[in-house]
């Protein structure tokens, strides 16, 4: 069986993001706000970025197109996260998360139209099942939390579009620049947005500055940062119409399983249904015939020369 680099990187991404998802609530429950968690995450992007730059002997693409694409990928990703914070402050999480979780739909549509990406019948079935699984896995029971007007809808829409665009642009940029350079610009833009995260932080409330605050957050966020690097590699070798729904569907499954083990949290039946669909979808997408792989490998080798 032929080794598929995109699949290896996609699996590594889902594992790291899945573990991160299960642990990230620990510092937040200990009194370390998510906005400061963003600051820590941005800083933990630096070590993987240095490793990536070392791989390419510090030869970063500095042309205008590469800088623009790299920064746009970083801004849509990190900027979307900051917008999500505000959306959750003004809107109900049980509506926000299912909506933004469908961002791979944008990636799939754009990649199908502009990148001419295609999949086999098995692949398309896997993609559809993954999208359904994503909705189920993001399910949260309705609560009595009041929403503040309709601003959250606009904010959620911004995140939905931003994250869908990010994955598409990441795949598009990988055709003309090194994955390592892409990640460097992601790291740089993440750092640039730190002041906005600080402005969004309510410093009037007590903040845990002990081990369970920034230090535990750093340990957990490094998992997120490594996953961010490997997802860039996954988009280098794999098709966006496959990589995007796969990683978005499978990472929550790992999170749910770990949460069951660590916190003894029994998942809702809807979520359990999503887990089954996600596992079926990853199998179908993993075995789907990829006629574009040879072309991608040739293109990647030329970029790295």
Image: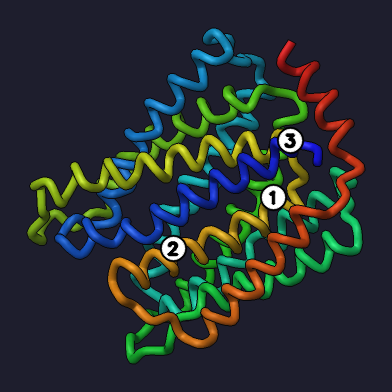
The residue singled out by tag 3 in the image is 237
Mark nearer the N terminus (1 vs 3): 3
Residue at 71% x, 46% y: name it: 168
Q: Is residue 58 above or below residue 79?
A: above
Name the quadrant containing residue 84.
bottom left
Mark identifier at residue 255: 2
Q: Which residue is mark 1?
A: 243
Viewer-nearest of discs 1 and 2: 2
Q: Report the side of 123 relative to 222 (left or right).
A: right
For the N terminus, the quadrant is top right
Q: In which image quadrant can residue 277 be found? A: bottom right
Secondary element at image label 1 = helix
Q: CA distance from mark 3 to mark 2?
A: 25 Å
The residue sitting at the front extreme is 1
Picture quarter with the C terminus: top right
* Mark 3 or 2, nearer chain start: 3
Instruction: From the top left corner, tell me how far across and down residue 118 is, in percent.
Output: 89, 52
């Amino acid at each position: 069986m032929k080794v598929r680099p995109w699949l290896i990187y996609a699996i590594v991404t889902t594992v790291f993001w899945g573990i991160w998802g299960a642990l990230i609530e620990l510092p937040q429950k200990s009194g370390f706000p998510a906005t400061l968690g963003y600051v820590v995450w941005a800083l933990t992007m630096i070590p993987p970025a240095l490793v990536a730059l070392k791989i390419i002997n510090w030869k970063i693409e500095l042309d205008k197109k590469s800088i623009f694409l790299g920064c746009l990928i970083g801004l849509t990703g990190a900027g979307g996260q900051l917008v999500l914070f505000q959306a959750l402050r003004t809107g109900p999480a049980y509506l926000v998360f299912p909506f933004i979780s469908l961002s791979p739909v944008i990636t799939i549509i754009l990649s199908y139209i502009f990148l001419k990406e295609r999949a086999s019948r098995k692949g398309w079935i896997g993609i559809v099942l993954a999208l359904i699984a994503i909705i189920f896995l993001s399910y949260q029971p309705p609560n009595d939390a009041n929403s503040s007007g309709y601003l959250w809808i606009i904010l959620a829409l911004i995140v939905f579009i931003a994250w869908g665009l990010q994955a598409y642009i990441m795949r598009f940029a990988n055709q003309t620049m090194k994955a390592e350079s892409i990640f460097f610009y992601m790291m740089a833009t993440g750092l640039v947005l730190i002041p906005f995260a600080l402005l969004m932080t309510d410093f009037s409330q007590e903040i845990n500055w002990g081990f369970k605050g920034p230090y535990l957050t750093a340990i957990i966020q490094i998992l997120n940062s490594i996953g961010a690097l490997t997802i860039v590699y996954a988009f280098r070798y794999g098709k966006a119409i496959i990589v995007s729904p796969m990683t978005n569907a499978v990472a929550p499954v790992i999170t749910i399983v770990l949460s069951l083990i660590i916190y003894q949290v029994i998942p809702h039946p809807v979520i359990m249904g999503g887990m089954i669909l996600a596992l079926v979808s990853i199998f179908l997408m993993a075995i789907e015939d990829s006629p574009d792989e040879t072309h991608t490998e040739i293109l990647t080798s030329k970029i790295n020369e």
